[in-house]
Image (tube, rainbow, N blue to C red):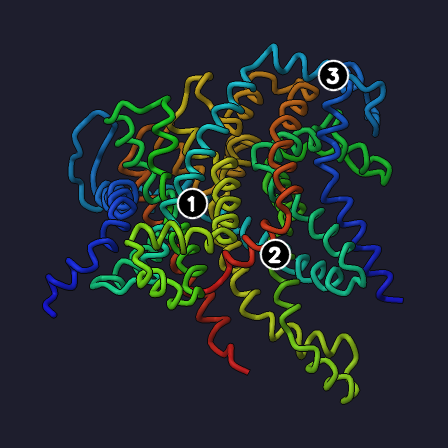
Amino acid sequence: MSLTRTIFKERWAYLFLLFPLLLFAVFNMLPMAATILLGFADYFPGGQPVWTGLENYAYALSDDLFWKALGITVLYTCGVVPASLLISLFLAYVIFGLKYAWAQVIFKSAFYLPVVTSGAILSLVWLWLFNPARGLLNYVLSFAGLGPYLWTSDPQMALPSLMFMAIMGGHGAAIVLLTAAMGGIPASYYEAARLDGAGPWRQYWKITLPLLRPTVLYLLVTSTIASFQVFTQVLMMTGGGPDYATTTLVYLIYTDAFEYFDFGKAAAEATLLSLSLAGIAVLQYKWLASDVEY
Amino acid sequence: MLKYVFKVILALFAVLTLMPLYWIVVTAFQTPSVVLAFPPSLVPSPASWINFARLFNGSEIGTWMANSLIVTGTVTASNVLLGTLAGYTLAKKDFPGRQTIFWTVISLMFIPSQLTIIPLYALIVQLDWINTYQALIVPALIMPFSIFLMKQFLQTLPTELIEAARMDGCGEWGVFQRVILPLAKPGMGVLAIFTFMGVWNDFLWPLIVINQSSMLTLQVGLNSLQNQYYTDYGLLMAGAAVSALPMIAFFLVFQPYFVRSITIGAIKG
């Protein structure tokens, strides 16, 4: 059967896919191509793009603020991602060991509630908790003789405050995934280990953790990408400050594009951000997935 | 012994995790003078609705919530329908270009929004869609993840079912409507929750394309509330409570679906 006849016979398939593909072309692929092109041009909304070659990249890469934002973003990610992962692994282990199914459900739900709560809501309440004069955190710490701290208003403490807030928040999804993966490990593995005299710690280290590796890898990659794109808290809680102490990459792109309307520079920065994200994902896969067979 | 220590740490961590949500409720129900008092009161006494009254009189939060519902409802319905249709096509039909289209969809899933948002904004300006529902809805009518998820879900259905329906004289649309749709329902439920949560909580896009108060979504509305009443924590927490309630209720009712949506979302391609 010739190709045209096959295509005609399967015309319904193309019809079913036509509308989504059209929307992808207009709202995903074209804008993506346009961002990459804009990175090589001077463009302000309403004007005509002027080709400037690598000027935007040279400008972005020689801009101290870009490197500062990159450093802040990396620091935030390197603090939040491992801490969250370790806490999630611990909480998932304890929850999975609970005898009653209802107790497991209650704890999983408790840790999931902040995940369904939006970043805007959490930003509002954390600003209130961090309030230097009347916030709950300074009140509680005063019993230990600590503080009062300025939290998000202190250039030294602003970024750690945002990191602390992130670490206290989103373990729900990781716990659900990890407990689901732990449920998939055959009980016979543990029985064999017990017969060989392995204690709980050894069982966790030698059986559970290695078998959780694909899940941990997935969590590591997704949470690194999410942390790298932190934005809502920065906009609502610190506005990138004080003294640029919390200006993350996405916040920098946002201000360059939508406050200074320098679309060319922002597009170059967005392209650099996307390349870094892709690079990180590939590195993490290489590093952790290299010997995932047992 | 260690087991009990672990359980105590688990309980403590759960309390700390829920503390911010509890603090929203406590502050929202306090009178403004109690909110200002130091040391803070750990329970709302005397409990009062006054912050909620001030919130609804002093802001357009009712309108914001309606806007969020309209946008999120439309986007969710459209993603579930188009995602199921396209996912079924990619899972069960054999046609030239299938692999190419599937891999295109997969790669689009990994494009960060920052890489498209600037020209997308310029496009919305060109279309004169700033401050409209279209700006919030049309670019999100179908998202790559919706197609991917439904394709993964429908792939497990036996192909014989479709062939049998075709033998019985079902046309292409008939097969989809009578055979696929009823069987796809659990997957569609998961996708609906996933999309609803993502769109409801979206922040950056509505922040950029909406600047008129009556058109804001709830999340960006909260940001404007924060800019307007930044020291009035009673009112701000009432706003947070009103905004958090629908999503938390939704979560508690559909809890099993949420759990499935997380595990299905993590399936490898």
Among all residues in the image, which is located at the extreme top? Answer: B57
In the image, A196: left or right of B129?
right
Q: Is residue B156 above or below residue A56?
A: below
Kind of residue at disc 1: Val
Nearest to viewer (mark 2 / mark 3): 3
Q: Is residue A209 above or below residue B9?
A: below
Kind of residue at disc 3: Trp
Q: CA distance from mark 1 to mark 2?
A: 25 Å
Nearest to viewer (mark 1 / mark 2): 1
The front one of A143 and B81 is: B81
The front one of A160 and A194 is: A194
Among all residues in the image, which is located at the extreme front? Answer: B168
Q: Which residue is mark 3?
A: B49
Residue B255: horizontal and vertical position, in percent? 64, 47
Q: Check disc 2: other Cα within 10 Å, few if <14, some if 14-19, many if 20+.
A: many
Q: Which residue is mark 1?
A: B80
Mark 1 falls on what kind of element? Answer: helix
Residue A17: horizontal and vertical position, in percent? 27, 50
Kind of residue at disc 2: Ala
Q: CA distance from mark 3 to mark 1?
A: 39 Å
In the image, B84: left or right of A110?
left
Q: Are marks 2 and 3 on the same chain?
A: no
Check contact, mark 3 vs mark 1: CB within 8 A. no
Quadrant of the image containing the C terminus of chain B: bottom left
Please tell me the numbered disc located at residue A174: 2
